[in-house]
């Protein structure tokens, strides 16, 4: 422990998951995250009390996760955009059944089969539910390989704590990137007992059952209210974000993941030209850091949201700002990564 | 006095809610008896489907989970992988297993998952009110084959037991019926063998159970049994299609 290892993002997630106690992985190959599936095969097939299954489809993979999660083990699946679309029914079941699991989406350009280059156009799908019904995932957006590691480990704890699926929302760039990472010793946190609900055989107790349905609408409504309560708690307790240079910025950029990384360089370059740019980088996309955005909009009146989409997170920023100031948007899509200079040019338009 | 007939321990006290003459209840009982016989109730995890038997979780007195429509074999795979010492079964209808869940059943069988599948073939979609199933017979009238199933455009009924028997990973497959006591006794044996296959760690087992749906067939319970014997059995022959040597 403590030493730094050079690792590819996708493999770093796998190692972090295993160190967090995940022994059950189910997945289906898709670029740009296949290295993660391969890493889990390499490791888990050699481990005791562990399983790796290359599922017949993403649909099967998420349903295997559902089954494994129901027995109380730490389990995960990973995919990229089209594969995540296929998983949605299963994710909705897992959210309804209130089971913990981790789902990784290394987004690529869409829609359709799209491209295999990085994208951020699955933001709506990830943060607004994605499948049918009123539910949310906890959505974590790393912007470096180190953060990928840390957030993957946190993801399993959050999933257990809230008995809710957690999504790591990365993109092809961060998945493919090599960086030095450290697997830090984690302090043990106390998590709720799974015995209450886990399917382990009914020896010595009443049977447990997991049924994500109720034909009585009033009972089903109660289930919804119960789940909703967790989301309110998440909004209270689990919001995470990074801020840079908020105090005397001429303009605030809001960006997450890979784009936020690019913005950090833009900030340095702009400084040389005498332009002060601030950054709000949401780390949790759900729960969304709306308070800090709202507070900042009381002080600074120029906002620009940059995404690798045609405008998705910008809607949440606008809701947070609530009409107080103008929120502008710049996006590239389809697998195109916005460059530093084009972003800086965009910023200059609003500073005239 | 010796009790010769009682409720299996693996069934709860809740009365079945299936329609009169429906075979789901008999099939449940046979599964419960097999779990009792092997003494595995307390380490069993059952997976119910979406279909009339979505309520199986109410009736089986063991840990239960409800899968999405067709996905029970994938859910069972996840359970068995993470709890290899448990006894895992799925209970699925023909729409569930042979239509929307075709990929999941084929691949669970092909991987040789050590699970038991109870496959209820009633030649119809019961729960949604009587639409064509992949097992609906040629000429059979349903809501969505109102002029009878026409194989030219709707294909022929799928013989699941035969199809899956071709897979090397499969250990035990048989097809049974429940329309008369002699068949029920054979079905009981087959279901027991299927669970024995799993208990002994021999791999994938499946019992296809030809069943009635009097409600959606538009027949009385007695007529339904007759219809099953005259129409389904000739097309879906009963018998064992695959047995691991030691279990046969
Ligand atoms: C994804 C999805 N598609 C469709 C349905 C609707 N649906 C519920 S049960 C069912 C058919 C069930 O038929 P079968 O599997 O034959 O079971 P039976 O009721 O006959 O026992 C369908 C189509 C659903 N619940 N989920
Ligand atoms: S609709 Fe058919 S399958 Fe469903 S309970 Fe009634 S008889 Fe049985
Ligand atoms: Mg049916």
Image: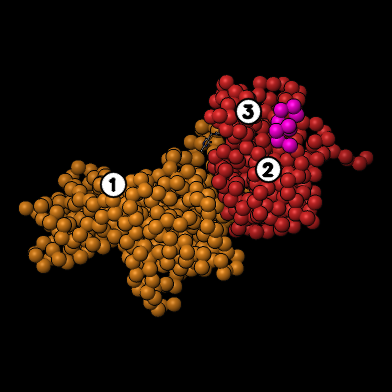
Residue B145, compared with residue A42, is above or below; it is: above
Question: Chain ID for label 3?
Answer: B
- The span from disc 2 to disc 3 (Cα, nearest Å) is 18 Å
Find disc 2 in the rendering and name its residue: B161
Pointer 1: what residue?
A312
According to the image, what is the colour scheme of the structure?
A: by chain
**Number of the label disc, if any, that sits on residue A253:** none
Quarter placement of the N terminus of chain A: bottom left
Query: Residue A210 lies in what quarter of the image?
Result: top right
Label 2 CA crowd tier, 10 Å (few <14, some 14–19, many 20+)? many
Q: Residue A243: which quarter of the image?
A: bottom left
Task: Name the element at disc 1.
Answer: loop
Q: Which chain is red?
A: B
Residue A135 in picture, x, y percent from top left? 43, 44
Q: Find out whether residue B230 is within the magenta segment.
A: yes
Give the label, 2 or 1, closer to the camera.
2
Specify the segment rendered in magenta.
Answer: B229-237
At 36% from the left and 51% from the top, the residue drawn is: A286
Q: Where is residue B184, by image quadrant? A: top right
Q: Which residue is nearer to you in this view: A283 or A27? A: A27
């Amino acid at each position: 422990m403590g030493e730094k290892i050079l690792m590819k993002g996708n493999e770093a997630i796998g190692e972090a998951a295993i160190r967090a106690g995940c022994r059950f992985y189910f997945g289906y190959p898709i670029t740009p995250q296949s290295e993660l599936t391969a890493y889990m095969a390499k490791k888990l097939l050699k481990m005791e009390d562990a399983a790796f299954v290359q599922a017949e489809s993403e649909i099967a993979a998420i349903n295997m996760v559902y089954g494994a999660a129901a027995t109380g083990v730490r389990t995960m699946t990973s995919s990229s955009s089209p594969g995540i679309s296929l998983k949605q029914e299963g994710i909705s079941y897992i959210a309804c059944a209130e089971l913990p699991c981790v789902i990784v989406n290394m987004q690529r350009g869409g829609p359709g089969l799209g491209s295999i280059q990085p994208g951020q156009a699955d933001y709506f799908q990830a943060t607004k539910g994605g499948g049918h019904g009123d539910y949310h995932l906890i959505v974590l957006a790393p912007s470096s390989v180190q953060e990928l590691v840390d957030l993957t480990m946190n993801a399993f704890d959050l999933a257990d704590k809230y008995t809710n699926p957690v999504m790591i929302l990365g993109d092809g760039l961060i998945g493919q990137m090599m960086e030095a990472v450290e697997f830090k010793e984690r302090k043990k946190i106390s998590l709720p007992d799974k015995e209450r609900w886990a399917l382990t055989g009914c020896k010595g107790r009443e049977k447990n059952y997991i049924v994500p349905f109720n034909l009585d609408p009033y009972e089903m409504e109660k289930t919804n209210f119960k789940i909703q309560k967790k989301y309110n708690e998440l909004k209270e307790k689990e919001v995470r974000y990074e801020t840079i240079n908020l105090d005397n910025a001429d303009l605030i950029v809001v960006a997450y993941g890979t784009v936020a990384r690019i913005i950090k360089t833009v900030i340095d370059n702009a400084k040389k030209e005498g332009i002060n740019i601030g950054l709000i980088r949401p780390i949790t996309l759900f729960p969304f850091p709306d308070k800090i955005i709202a507070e900042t909009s009381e002080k600074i009146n120029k906002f620009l949201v940059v995404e690798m989409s045609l405008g998705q997170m910008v809607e949440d920023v606008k809701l947070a700002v609530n009409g107080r100031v103008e929120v502008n948007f710049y996006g590239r899509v389809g697998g195109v990564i916005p460059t530093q200079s084009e972003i800086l040019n965009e910023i200059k338009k609003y500073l005239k | 006095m010796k009790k010769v007939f009682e409720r299996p321990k693996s069934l709860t006290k809740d009365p079945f809610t299936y329609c009169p003459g429906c075979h789901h209840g008999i099939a449940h009982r046979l599964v419960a008896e097999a779990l009792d016989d092997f003494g595995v109730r307390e380490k069993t995890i059952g997976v119910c489907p979406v279909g009339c038997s979505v309520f199986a979780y109410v009736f089986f007195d063991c840990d239960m989970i409800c899968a999405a429509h067709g996905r029970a074999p994938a859910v069972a795979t996840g359970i068995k992988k993470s709890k290899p010492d448990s006894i895992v079964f799925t209970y699925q209808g023909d729409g569930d297993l042979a239509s929307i869940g075709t990929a999941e059943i084929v691949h669970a069988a092909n991987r040789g998952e050590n699970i038991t599948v109870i496959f209820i073939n009633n030649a119809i979609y019961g729960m949604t009110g009587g639409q064509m199933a992949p097992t609906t017979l040629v000429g059979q009238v349903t809501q969505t084959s109102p002029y009878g199933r026409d194989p030219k455009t709707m294909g022929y009924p799928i013989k699941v037991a035969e199809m899956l028997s071709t897979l090397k990973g499969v250990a035990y497959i048989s097809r049974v019926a429940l329309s008369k006591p002699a068949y029920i006794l054979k079905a009981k044996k087959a279901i027991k063998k299927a669970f024995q296959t799993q208990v002994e760690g021999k791999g994938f087992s499946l019992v296809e159970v030809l069943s009635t749906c009097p409600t959606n067939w538009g027949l009385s319970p007695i007529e339904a049994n007759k219809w099953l014997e005259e129409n389904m059995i000739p097309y879906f022959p009963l018998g064992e299609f695959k047995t691991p040597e030691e279990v046969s």
